[in-house]
Image (cartoon, rainbow, N blue to C red):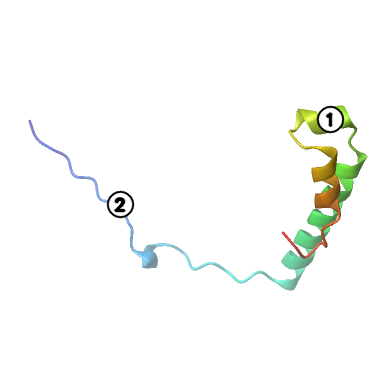
Amino acid sequence: MSATIIRFASSPTSLPAPREPTPVAWLKEFARRWGTRRLLLDLDDQMLRDIGVTRAEAEFEAGKPFWRA
């Protein structure tokens, strides 16, 4: 029986360097956070239970400033 050796590229140079987010990308992310947090407040208690979130957790998340993840 023979063994097959598989080599994976694990060198950091084999991966593309991460790009710095652009100002437009930051604004889009901030708008997405703000919008989804506002939508949480529109969900009724049954919908929140369906996704495993309490009303208190939803209000806490919605109260965060948009720049906080």
Q: Quadrant of residue 50?
A: top right
Q: Residue at x 75, y 63 (%)?
A: 68
Q: In the image, residue 26 lies at what x, y percent?
A: 74, 66
In the depicted structure, whether residue 44 falls above or below residue 37: above
**Among numbered discs 1 and 2, the one appearing first in the sequence:** 2
**Relative depth, front residue between 5 and 44:** 44
User: Of the numbered discs in the image, which one, if any, rests on residue 47?
Assistant: 1
Secondary structure beneath disc 1? helix
User: Of the numbered discs in the image, which one, if any, rests on residue 19?
Assistant: none
Q: Which residue is tagged 2? A: 8
Secondary structure beneath disc 2? loop
Q: In the image, residue 42 lies at what x, y percent?
A: 92, 40
Q: Residue at x 79, y 66 (%)?
A: 27
Q: Amino acid at mark 2?
A: Phe
Q: In the image, residue 22 lies at what x, y percent?
A: 69, 71
Mark 2 Cα shell of 10 Å, populated few (<14), some (14-19), many (≥20): few
**Relative depth, front residue between 54 and 7:** 54
Mark 1 Cα shell of 10 Å, populated few (<14), some (14-19), many (≥20): few
Q: Marks 1 and 2, how far apart in space?
A: 44 Å
**Quadrant where the C terminus is found in the figure:** bottom right
- Contact between marks 1 and 2 (CB within 8 A): the answer is no
Q: Is residue 35 left or right of residue 19?
A: right
Q: Residue at x 85, y 39 (%)?
A: 55
**Quadrant where the N terminus is found in the figure:** top left
In the depicted structure, whether residue 49 falls above or below residue 19: above
In the depicted structure, whether residue 22 falls above or below residue 7: below
Q: In the image, residue 30 lies at what x, y percent?
A: 79, 62
Q: Amino acid at mark 1?
A: Met
Label 1 vs label 2, nearer the camera = 1
Question: How many labels, in total?
Answer: 2
